[in-house]
Image (cartoon, rainbow, N blue to C red):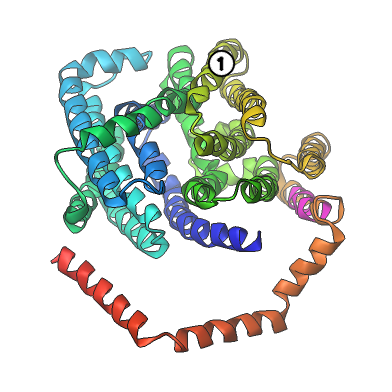
Amino acid sequence: MLDYLRRLVTTGFAYTAASVVSKVIAVLLLPLYTSYLTPADYGQAELLFSTVVAASIVIRLGLIEALMRFYYLPGERGDRVIATGFAALLWTTTAGAIVALPFASQIGDAISGEPLDPGLVRIAIGGLWVLTLYEYMVTLFRLDERARAYFAFTIGNVLLAIPLTVTLVVALDAGAEGLLLGAYLAGLPFLLWLIAAERRRLALRPDRGLLRRMFRFGLPTMPAEISIYSLAFIDRVIISHSLGPAQLGLYGLAFKFSQAIQVVVRGFQLAWPPLAYSIRDDEDARRTYAVVVTAFAALCGTIVVGMWLEARWIVRLLAAPDFFDSYEAIGPLALGAALYGIYLALVVILGRTGKTQYNFPVTAAATIANVVLNLLLVPAWGIVGAGVALTLSYLIVIVLIHSVSRRIFPIPWQWGRLAVIAAAAAVLIAAGEALLPDAGAAGFLSRLALAALYPAILWFGGAVRAAERRQVLELLGPERLRARWAVLRERRAGESDEEARAETLYEQEVRDQRD
């Protein structure tokens, strides 16, 4: 069990580290962007970014999800799976972008309550092509579990995007157009480089038989994935139509701040499926799934409590005054992101059994609930209503998918620990909002102290047993750490000549592909 957790943490940390660095840089640039952009400009850019992601989910037709599963099936050839998926995705993405370009004005009118510049929509359509193929290509790093390469590649993209976006937004005063161009143009050279480097594993013509099998698995996941993503997309459309682009800009900024937990969820999303699908024994998988969900919930709960209590100070530190009211939605959005991570853990169960046809009815029901909740709560509570609607919708989808999965692949969930995790977070947040100051140094420090109580409550309050506490302390003890370091050095020093030659040949092959 510890081996699985260590593997998940290792790969997840690499994926999360890349996301953390990129998100931290993005957040640190918010004071600059919010000084040069109006809330309406920011809202339009965020609406189009979300639309591109939603369209990408549709246009890839479940192929990335099928790639993740078929690559590990014993009866399939991994490289053939990669080649077939790429060929199909290249043609569907290119055809989709070509079809959408003439309808830029109509697309803008449909998603926004106010006139939207067709030029912005055309940039987003080009971004759709780049993003979809980019996501497929970086999935190869995950398949190979090349976490360091994933980190370096992602950070390189970020380091190019930052000066490009700053130049467009600040120096050239390009507004929302600068945000969109900076994001998508920076990704294009990295996409082309990766296609060239991996060209031996790619193809322009798919294996039709294999493609049909991949579609049978992947297509049922597409409606489900777009439904679950629509929970974080419908709210933007409704806010745009009901409250206007300025309020959408505040909501988009609150969503950006909630990425403190989204980076953890993203790392989990990238690292979890390869690990979960690689566990062959069903009983071993059941135990691992239960432990992983409990640990993940505890980590997310710690972040949600801190963000909810300190939201006011986060916004005032990192945004221009016109954006200060965005703090109101940070807490609910952070909680929604945590619940989304729990959903990702549950949906892997259905993927393991191949029963992906159940995904769509579950997520469709949650999507309908989300639309109704947003229509009711956004006019009454503004952007806070949208955050609450998102949280409630994720709760609905978790309950529904659990009711389905427990009949197909029952898991011995650790309900007592999960109850402690949820109850402690709710009590601390309620106490902080009701009893503690909401301004000044006193408010900041008292809320920080309250948030710091949460890990202690989990540690001593039932989420971690006494035997587990002793085990963790032993693992983190200086003697144990020194011993593990010595073992790692001995293993490294004891590599056989054959392994060393194999590694050298692999590195030479990579260099040849790059050349």
- Asked if residue 169 can be seen in this view, the reply is no
Up-down relation of residue 6 to residue 40 (above or below): below
Report the span colored magenta. 447-457
Quadrant of the rendered image containing residue 117? top left
- Asked if residue 151 can be seen in this view, the reply is yes
Residue at 62% over, 13% down: 380
Up-down relation of residue 241 to residue 4 (above or below): above
- Magenta portion: prevailing SS class: helix
In the image shown, does 282 or 464 lie closer to the viewer? Answer: 282
The spot of residue 241 in percent (x, y) is 43, 13
Residue occupied by mark 1: 365
The spot of residue 151 in percent (x, y) is 39, 60
Which amino acid, by three-letter code, is at mark 1?
Ala
Quadrant of the rendered image containing residue 504? bottom left
The spot of residue 279 in percent (x, y) is 55, 52
Q: Is residue 32 left or right of residue 16?
A: left
The spot of residue 25 in percent (x, y) is 43, 54
Q: Is residue 192 left or right of residue 341?
A: left
In the image, residue 62 lies in the stretch drawn in magenta: no
Quadrant of the rendered image containing residue 141? bottom left
Residue at 25% over, 37% down: 174
Rendered-image quadrant of the C terminus: bottom left
In the image shown, does 485 or 169 lie closer to the viewer? Answer: 485
Determine whether the residue tagged by mark 1 lies in a helix, strand or loop. Answer: helix
Rendered-image quadrant of the N terminus: bottom right
> Going by the picture, which residue comes out furthest to the front?
75
